[in-house]
Image (cartoon, grey):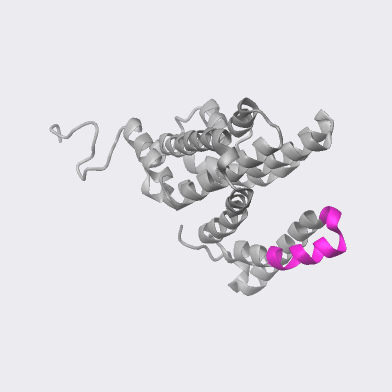
Amino acid sequence: MTGARDSESEDGEPHSAAQWWLRGVGAAVSLPGLLLMSASVGYAALSRESGISLALTLFMMNFIWALPAQVVLIGAMLSGASLPAAAIAVSLSSVRLMPMVVAIVPEMRVPATRNWVLYFLSHFVAVTSWVVSMQRFHEVPRGRRTAYYLGIALALLTGANIVIAGVYLAAAQLPQAVAAGLFFLMPMYFLTSLWGSAREHASLFAMVFGLVLGPVFHLIIPGIDLLAAGLVGGIGAYLLHRHTSPGGVKEGRAP
C-alpha cells in the first residue's frame, strides 16, 4: 500500500526505533520503577551517612547499576577492605545477573544486530529493567527490542540519578527510620517481581526453598548461608520440577 505512512503500520503500531524507544521510556513508568526509585532513596541516605561523596555515589549508580552490589562496595570501603577484595565481593554479588543477561540477549538479537549494541545494553541489565522488558517483549517487534530496552534502561537510570541526587542533598531532613524502611523495599520488590515473572514451576520452587532455607542456614553456617541456600534450594527445585512435570518436560508459563 503506497499510501501507508513510514512511521506507523496500518494498525497504528509504531514502526520507527525512536517511537519504540519512547514506548520503552513510558514502560519504565511503572510500579517496579517506582519501587526502584524508593529503594534508591535508601541507597542515597546510606551513602551519605557513610561519608561517600555525591559524585562517587552517582558514579557507583551509573557504572555498577545494581543496588546490592553498590551496598556491598560501600560496606567494603567502610571496613577498610583492599581494592582486590572489594572488587571480588562486588563481582560475586553481581554474578546473579549473568543468567538474566543470557536470557535477555537472545530476545533482542536479530541477524542485523551488532555485537557491540548487545554488549552495551548488557550493562543495563538489572532486576527492574529485566522484569519490565521480559514481561512486555512479546508486544514488541524483535527488530525494535533493542531500542525499546534502551528506553526502559535509560529512563530508570535517569530517574534513579535524579532521586539519589535530590535525597542525598536533603538527607539531613529525612528520618533514618524512613530511609531504612524505603531501602528494605528493594528485597521485597526483588522477590515479588521475580515471582511474577517466573515462567516455569522450578523458579517458584527455588524461591520457596530459598525463603525457608535462608534463615536455617544463617543459624547453622552464617558465613556462607546465602550460597548454601541458593545451591541446595536450586538443586532441590530442579529435582522437584523434574519429578512433578510429566515426563520431565518443562511447563512454561505465559510471560
The percent position of residue 118, horizontal first and vertical second, equals: 53, 32
Residue 137 on the magenta span: no
Q: Nearer the viewer, residue 31 or 43?
A: 43
Number of numbered callouts drawn: 0
Residue 217 on the magenta span: yes
In screen coordinates, is 137 left or right of 123?
A: left
The quarter holding residue 60 reads top right
The percent position of residue 81, horizontal first and vertical second, equals: 84, 34
The residue furthest left is: 3
Q: Quadrant of the N terminus?
A: top left
In the image, residue 202 above or below residue 68: below
In the image, residue 97 above or below residue 207: above
The percent position of residue 200, horizontal first and vertical second, equals: 56, 63
Q: Main secondary structure of the magenta part?
A: helix
Q: Nearer the viewer, residue 180 or 64?
A: 180
| Res. 137 visible in picture | yes
| Residue at position x 59%, y 42% in the image | 101
The percent position of residue 62, horizontal first and vertical second, equals: 58, 31
**Which stretch appears magenta?**
209-224
In the image, residue 58 above or below residue 244: above
In the image, residue 143 above or below residue 255: above
In screen coordinates, is 158 left or right of 224?
A: left
| Residue at position x 22%, y 43% in the image | 12
| Res. 110 visible in picture | no
| Residue at position x 57%, y 44% in the image | 174
